[in-house]
Image (spheres, rainbow, N blue to C red):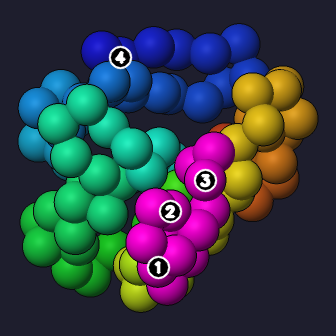
Amino acid sequence: MRVSSEAGYEVYSAGSIAETSLAQGSFDALVTDFDLGDGTGRQVIDTYHAEYPAETTKMVVLTGNPDGPDGKRREIIRETGATLVKKSGRISDIKTVVALIGTPDNLRKT
């Protein structure tokens, strides 16, 4: 689903891998939760890298459990080149993501 924000970001929202909008083209930034209903954020990032290998898209993975059940989640996220943000369920999570990806104007310049 496409959402426009007052801050100037153009946002595509999906609750599952099946709903992702990778066919829309490349993005300036990709933000995903690690745990999705039908897979993982790692799968979304791997698919994006396969579709757009030359892109230097900023990527952020949110998760409430940075270590994961097997203790390897941080390593898995690091392998994708994404930045890990531990989810707390607070608005500060979004502020952290915005600080990492930059403002819409800065994203367009990179």
The amino acid type of the residue labelled 1 equals: Lys
Between the residue at mark 1 and the residue at mark 4, the CA separation in whole angstroms equals: 33 Å
The residue shown at (22%, 60%) is 43
Between the residue at mark 4 and the residue at mark 3, the CA separation in whole angstroms equals: 28 Å
Q: Which residues are magenta?
A: 62-75
Residue with the mark numbered 3 = 65
SS category of the residue bearing label 3: loop
Between the residue at mark 3 and the residue at mark 2, the CA separation in whole angstroms equals: 5 Å
Which of disc 3 and disc 4 is earlier in sequence? 4
Residue with the mark numbered 2 = 68
Q: Which mark is residue 18?
A: none
Which of disc 2 and disc 4 is earlier in sequence? 4
The quarter of the image holding the N terminus is top left
Residue with the mark numbered 1 = 72
How packed mark 1 is, by other alpha carbons closer than 10 Å (few <14, some 14-19, many 20 or more), is: few
- Horizontal relation, residue 25 to residue 109: left or right: left
> Which corner quadrant of the image does residue 95 belong to?
top right
Between the residue at mark 3 and the residue at mark 1, the CA separation in whole angstroms equals: 11 Å
Disc 4 vs disc 2: Cβ atoms closer than 8 Å?
no
The residue shown at (21%, 79%) is 53
Q: Is residue 67 magenta?
A: yes
Disc 3 vs disc 2: Cβ atoms closer than 8 Å?
yes
Closer-to-camera residue (90/81): 90
Q: Position of residue 67 (x, y in %)?
A: 59, 68
